[in-house]
Amino acid sequence: MILTVTLNTALDLTYRVPRLDVHGSHQVREVVQRPGGKGLNVARVLAALGHRTVVTGFAGGLTGSELRELLARERNIEDELVTTAGSTRRTVGVVDESGGGSTQFNEPGPHISPEEWSAFQEVYARLLENGGSSGSGDGGAPEAVALCGSLPPGVPVGAYAQLTKEAHAAGVPVVLDTSGEPLRRGLAARPDLVKPNAEELAGITGTAEPLHAARAAQRRGARSVAASLGPEGMLLVTPDGMWQAGPPRSLTGNPTGAGDSAVAGLLAGLVEGVPWPEMLARAVALSAATVRAPTAGEFDEGLHADLLSQVTVEESSEPAPG
């Protein structure tokens, strides 16, 4: 079982329009509604890959109820979300079919009270010990934990560092996918793998060159770093070596959730014990296949299989100081 933590869940709405014009009126061609937030997107991709997943975090209000109703329809995903008094946020993604890009609107999350944070901590500790309450799986600790996304108001900025330490105390490896100060503080707890994009990595290290920045993140505590390079693919820096991989061709579509699919690929490889280069190839192929899917948390399975056979992984060398 893999445990994903989404402290700032969202009800994701995706609108598709023939063409997006700023300040214009639009006829929406299609509306898709899904449970969202980075960790829930990761969980859906993992479930599609055949991994049992437990999700925890927060959900509340009418939007939270809708999110949980949709989540209940998903296979291989167990709901261990903690109910809050405040309403779960919504995110709206507008896909421009003429150019293939998307525009994202993210509401702030609800304020989490000290009592709600304590309730979550109790659930998290239980899940680290027994892996959920459904009775499926082996009933033991998770094979890995993914800590994903932004922190809602009221949650301590050092929350991910604390949750990483608790997972490690239970013998569970941690993948951390966040940004800003939560990432900066999380590094000190020595997560097994972090997955920032190049901009996020530069923001916490002050270094623009991705490999130098990844090395700086390692010095701050990360054991391994998978840096997303956008359309160019991903750089993976580990204690065992460094590799870079990119998709075999450029793909247009909706990039929302592509990074979450990459996290799912990394997690699946981690728990399956595959070599680092293969793990990287899986992540890149899943990320690219997600661009062609209608919503985050999904991927084009046929395209994924095709891309995976064509992804080239190259060993990287240390760039010269500059």
Image (cartoon, grey):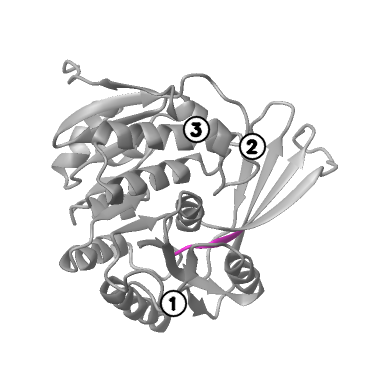
Residue 94 shown left or right of residue 246 in the figure: right
Q: Which mark sits nearer the N-terminus, 1 or 3?
A: 1
Q: Which mark sits nearer the N-terminus, 3 or 2?
A: 2
Query: Closer to the camera, 293 or 92?
Result: 293
Please give the label number shown on residue 30. Answer: none
> SS class of the residue under badge 2?
strand
Residue identifier under label 3: 305
> SS class of the residue under badge 3?
helix
Residue drawn at point x = 45 percent, y = 67 percent: 153
- Tell me the mark number nearer the camera, choosing from 3 and 2: 3
Vertical placement of residue 192 versus 275, above or below:
below
Residue 36 shown left or right of residue 6 in the figure: right
The type of residue carrying mark 3 is Ala
Residue 275 falls within the magenta-colored stretch: no
Residue identifier under label 1: 134
- Residue 95 seen: yes
| CB within 8 Å, label 1 to label 3 | no
Q: Which mark sits nearer the N-terminus, 2 or 1?
A: 2
Residue 205: percent from left, percent from top: 25, 38
Query: Closer to the camera, 7 or 316?
Result: 316
Residue identifier under label 2: 102
Magenta extent:
6-11
Query: Closer to the camera, 151 or 246?
Result: 246
Residue 60: percent from left, percent from top: 57, 75
